[in-house]
Image (cartoon, rainbow, N blue to C red):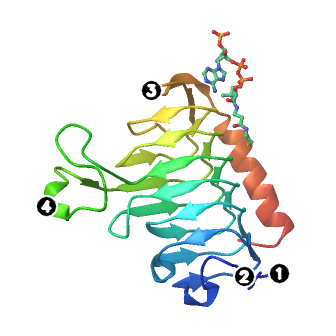
């Protein structure tokens, strides 16, 4: 099942690669040694990853996502979390007020660059074309609809939408956890 024909990075250099992983041929990983991938993971084509990254089991990253911020920034995606197409997780960011943003000049001229982390906890969904800024945590089950801007932590099992993302409604925690329990039983996983 593992696709070793990737054309933009060397899959054998990944820090960890689980079982039953599908990685699109055009996925680009800048620093494979900083990327861990668990079991049952799909990363679809045209996704670009330039951070340290830990992907747990049963995660889906749809096509065209950007997980960016450089190798000193860190992103974690926990079990059953998903990114819809074209999501941007920006774990690091340039100084938009007092710095020179281009990477073509030395770091000392770049101002107050943010080097941070983004944590997407279990059962979180990030809707299509949403942007998540540095140092944001999606607590368990929190999610955002399409085209959202997430600039602060999201509370457990709540659904948010908009720019910036605002609370819309509660998610059905009991139903989702019950579905997970049934699924684990079906595959004989404790
Ligand atoms: C957020 C979402 C799940 C809400 O769906 P829903 O529960 O059926 O909600 P509704 O359609 O009843 O919308 C409720 C309100 O939120 C607004 N709304 C819904 N989605 C919105 C979004 N993404 N951004 C801004 N507002 C949104 C609606 O316009 C409506 O506003 P109103 O009450 O003023 O009319 C859905 O709209 C969405 O964005 N889904 C993401 C889909 C996606 O990205 N799929 C990719 C493949 S997984």
Q: Earlier in the sequence, mark 1 or mark 2?
A: 1
Q: Name the element at disc 4.
A: helix
Indicate which label's residue lies in the foreground, 1 or 2: 1
User: Which label is found at residue 164?
Assistant: 3
**In the image, 166: left or right of 171?**
left
Q: CA distance from mark 1 to mark 4?
A: 45 Å
Give the distance between the C-alpha atoms of the residues marked 3 and 1, in whole angstroms.
39 Å
Q: Nearer the viewer, residue 43 or 184?
A: 43
The label nearer to you, 2 versus 3, is 3
Which residue corresponds to the image point at 48% horizontal and 62% vertical from the top-left? 76
Residue placed under numbered mark 1 in the picture: 1
Callout 1 environment at 10 Å: few (<14), some (14 to 19), or many (20+)?
few
Residue 140: image location, x then y, percent? 53, 47
Residue 6 x %, y %: 70, 79
- Residue 63 shown left or right of residue 137 in the figure: right
Q: CA distance from mark 2 to mark 3?
A: 37 Å
Residue wearing tag 4: 108
Find the distance from the CA under tag 4 to the CA under tag 2. 42 Å
Which residue is pictured at 15% across the width and 56% down the height?
109
Label 1 close to label 2 by CB (< 8 Å): yes
Q: Is tag 3's residue or tag 1's residue first in the polypeptide sequence?
A: 1
Which sits earlier in the primary sequence, circle 2 or circle 3?
A: 2
Mark positioned earlier in the residue sequence (3 or 4)? 4
- Give the x, y percent position of residue 43: 69, 65
Please say if the residues under marks 1 and 4 sit with CB atoms less than 8 Å apart: no
Q: Secondary structure at mark 1?
A: loop
Give the residue displayed 74% in from the left and 48% down from the top.
178
Residue behind mark 2:
19
Badge 1 or badge 4: first in the primary sequence: 1
Q: From this viewpoint, which residue is outermost toward the front?
A: 104
State the quadrant of the C terminus.
bottom right
């Amino acid at each position: 099942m593992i696709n070793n024909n990737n054309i933009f990075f060397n899959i054998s250099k990944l820090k960890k690669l689980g079982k039953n992983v599908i990685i699109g041929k055009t996925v680009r990983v800048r620093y494979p040694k900083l990327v861990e991938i668990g079991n049952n993971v799909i990363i679809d084509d045209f996704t670009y990853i330039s951070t340290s990254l830990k992907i747990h089991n049963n995660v889906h990253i749809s096509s065209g996502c950007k997980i960016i911020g450089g190798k000193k920034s860190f992103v974690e995606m926990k079990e059953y979390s998903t990114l819809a197409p074209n999501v941007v997780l920006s774990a690091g960011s340039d100084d938009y007020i007092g710095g020179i943003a281009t990477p073509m000049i030395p770091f000392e001229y770049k101002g107050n660059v943010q080097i941070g982390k983004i944590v997407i906890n279990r059962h979180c969904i990030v809707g299509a074309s949403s942007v998540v800024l540095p140092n944001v945590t999606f607590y368990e089950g929190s999610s955002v609809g399409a085209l959202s801007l997430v600039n602060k932590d999201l509370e457990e099992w709540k659904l948010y939408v908009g720019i910036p993302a605002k609370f819309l409604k509660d998610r059905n925690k009991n139903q989702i956890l019950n579905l997970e329990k049934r699924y684990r039983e079906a595959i004989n996983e404790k």
